[in-house]
Structures are given as C-alpha cells and as structure tokens.
Image: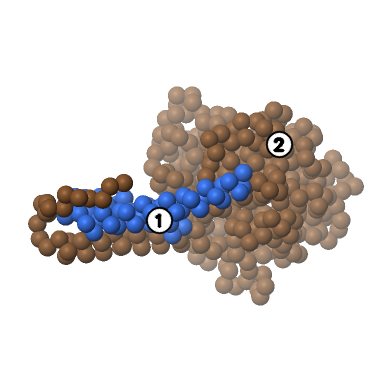
Chain colours: A brown, B blue
Amino acid sequence: MTVAGNGSENRGGGAPLVRKLVLGALGVLLLVTSGLSFYRHRHLEEPVVLSDGVTEVKKLSDYFDGIRGTVNDCNVYFFEGAEPGATMFVMGGTHPEEPAARLAAWLIAENAVMEQGRLIVVLSGNRSATTVTRLGGAYPPDFAIPTDWGAQTFRLGDRWSNPLDQWPDPEVYIHYPSRQYLAYVDARNLNRTWPGRPDGTLTERTTYALLELIRRENVDIFIDLHEAELQYPVISTIVTHERGEELAIFVSMMLSDEEFNIGTEYSPKNLHGLSHREVGDASQAISLLFEAPEPFLDATRGRTTREQLLTGIDEFVMKAGEHGLLFEHIDESGWPIDVRVGRHTSTVLQTMEAWTELYPDRPLSCRGVPRYAEVIAEGLGHWLHDPSEAAPGRLVTE
Amino acid sequence: MAILQTLITVLYYGLIAYVAVILIWNFSKTRKWEQEVLYIIVLIPFLLRLFRLK
C-alpha cells in the first residue's frame, strides 16, 4: 500500500478541500444507506403468533450450552398432545433461501394443535443464514406475504451461515467425523455439518445442539424441510434414511394418489453431513427430508426479484425446460409459494397419518394445519395471524 | 479449528482497520479527483465489514 505522492495535479478544478468534503459526504451517505439496509435485514424481527397448541417455547441452548448467546440460539416450539403418542420434530430454515420450508413451519407454529402425540417445531434451523443473502447475488433482503390483516415481512436468507458469524472458510471442508472432503463453503452449510461436534464451528455446534434435542426428547421422526432448483434431480421428493423407507413410501403413495406427485429417494450411505443420513445414523429418529420445487434457485433464472421468489414464474427456467434440462415440470403458472408451502404442510400431515397407521400404539394426530388444497385456495397469508391481536404471552419473534 | 478461526478473524479485522486508515489517509492527501472517488468507493466495503454490517 502506497500513500499518494503526486499530489500536485488538480485536474478536477475547484477548491480541493470543498471537493473532498463533498465526496466525503457522499461516501458517508452511501455507507449509511447501505449499512442501514444490511443492519435492518440482519435485525428484522419476524413475529410468530403462537398457536393455542403451543405448550412451551424453549431455546436450542437448553440442549447444548455451547450455542447459548449466539445468533443460532433459536426458538424451539413444543406442542404436547391431549393424548400420548409418538414425537415428531419438524424443522424449517436449514437453508433460509428456501422460504417455503420456513413458511410451512410457520403455519404449523401458528395453527397446529396436537390431539395425539407430541410435535416439536423449529423455524430457523440456521438462524445465522437468515441474516444474509447470497453475496454478490443481488437477492432481495426480504419478502412480504399478503395476509387478511396486512402484509407480514420475512427475512430472505442464504444457504450458508453468515460469514459475520463464522469465518474464515477452509480451503477444503473436511466433514467431521467421516473426514469426507466437501466444498469449502459447505463448512457453513447446516445440511453438511451433521452430526456436528461440541467444540466445532458455529454451524457444527448448531447441528450438535439439534441432535442433542433429538436424542433427549426421544424424537421418533425428524423432518427437514427444503426447496430445490428444477435443474437438481432431487426434487419433489422425500429423501429417507433406510429406517424410514416404509413410512416415506407410504406417504409418497398416498399423496401422489390424492393430492400431488411426490417421489421417494434413499439417502446415500456414503454422502456425509446431510440430515437424512447423519440423524438417522446417530440417533433413534427416522430422518426424512422433503424437497419442493423453487425456480428462484435455478442458475438459469432471470432477474432475482421478490416477485419471482413468490410466483415461481421465470421464462428462462421455462426455456431450460423446453430443452429437457429440468427434473420438474414448469409452465406459465410457475411454482407459487402457496403451492410449495401447501406441499410441505400436506406431506407433514400425511406423515403423521401414515405413521399412525404403521404404529397405532404410538399415534400422531394434529388439527388446525391447512393441507395443500386449503393453502392454495385461501393463500398462505390467511393462516398467518395478526401480531397486534395476539394474546398476552403468545407472541414471540424469530 | 475454532481457536484458529478466532485468531484469523481478529487479525483480519486488524488488517481491515489498517487498510481503511490508509485509504482515508490517501483520500486526504491526493489532489486527483478520480483517485478521491476511487478511494471512497473502495473504502465503503471495508467499513461495512469493520462495523460488522456486511
């Protein structure tokens, strides 16, 4: 770094001091406006109006102290059923650039009432990743869902933890404990750091804490909600650990017959760090991962806008489809957010029903959560409740 | 790994602060308007990172 030495030129004309003051003021203005935008995104509070069925709200750090006070010390919502049964854990926000996953979990948190069994819900599995968007990607920082009482704004996030919370990245990410080599950036990917470790990075400590939750609460079924680009072969499907094979196929058959097409895929045994593999291997829980289609994620998409995020309409992705490059159908109607969220809520509810048929001595039943057709008919905003009318003690923020 | 990351992060923020000071110094000393504009534009991401905004 050299200090400017040839200061004799003044080709701009005018008084240099005045010019410096003006340019400096412009610089401060740019810094303040951009800084405020980033600050507001990172600190936007998202309201959750607790369903009558929420019996307790814990913090993730209640299961592992090493996460306490960090950005990833997320809320954990408990729904205790009127009658005993199995325990299901539904998690959104593993990849917060996949908003249908968080929103489906939101609808559950605001509407579910368990009649049999117990439900645990997390809306922000990787909360750090909800505070940043794809660097250099020109993503919108947030999006709004129209509701019956106005619009509710949510943070749009990224696939990876915020570099402000975990940095630097290694040259190559070596997964613990398998020592499998993965892409460097996946050191910040919550779905590449399972089962985690207590003395690891923030993302590894988060998965460790989540796994502690699964073990200590004796979770029977763990569901990790996602969305996928249409150019990715693992789409519109349930990825299952081998112990969940029967359950996943049963759910897939029922949904494909009655509501929408959804497949089943096995978790590869030699691909490490993913929830459907590691949670199933390291705990008593059956681990499932649901994928819904999200054209916003496709590399061939057009402008990356809020509209595209919510409508799932993109002429360039459609063009890719015309050339046979996609693993899911797309047309002029796109993949609206209501459709994507409805797929997830119905798949969760169908999993409860299928589980209860397979294990009637440990049932799961839930009311209040809208299924696919209801979400599409009413719009998902209909199922989000007005925070200003929340009963005392029934409003929390994510 | 975590300790190493913390150490590198601290050094990194020190480096950012050092470069930011140099940029401000150069901005104050240069008399070319093109360089003044350049220094301001280059400085902003350093400050955003230093203040942990981005």
Percent of width and height locating residue B25: 28, 57
What is the tally of numbered marks visible in this picture?
2
Classify 10 Å Cα crowding around label 2: few (below 14), some (14-19), many (20 and above): few
**Could you say whether the residue bearing mark 1 is in a helix, strand or loop?**
helix
**Considering only vertical position in the picture, is A258 above or below A44?**
above
Percent of width and height locating residue A2: 28, 47
Q: Residue at x 71, y 49 (%)?
A: A198
Q: Chain of mark 2?
A: A
- Return the mark for residue A177: 2
Percent of width and height locating residue A38: 43, 57
- Return the mark for residue B17: 1
Q: Residue at x 31, y 50 (%)?
A: B42
- Return the mark for residue A178: none
Closer to us: A152 or A136: A136
> Farthest residue in the top direction?
A324
CA gap, disc 1 to disc 2? 37 Å
Q: Is residue A366 left or right of residue B37?
A: right
Q: Residue at x 20, y 61 (%)?
A: A20
Q: Is residue A187 visible?
A: yes
Q: Quadrant location of residue A109? A: bottom right
**Could you say whether the residue bearing mark 2 is in a helix, strand or loop?**
loop
Percent of width and height locating residue A354: 79, 42
Q: Is residue A372 visible?
A: no
**Considering only vertical position in the picture, is A336 above or below A114?**
above
Q: Residue at x 63, y 61 (%)?
A: A69
Given the image, on which type of amino acid does mark 1 rest?
A: Ala
Given the image, on which type of amino acid does mark 2 rest?
A: Pro
Q: Is residue A132 left or right of residue A198?
A: left
> Farthest residue in the bottom direction?
A392
Foreground mark, 1 or 2? Answer: 1
**Considering only vertical position in the picture, is B18 above or below A55?**
above
**Considering only vertical position in the picture, is A325 above or below A315?**
above
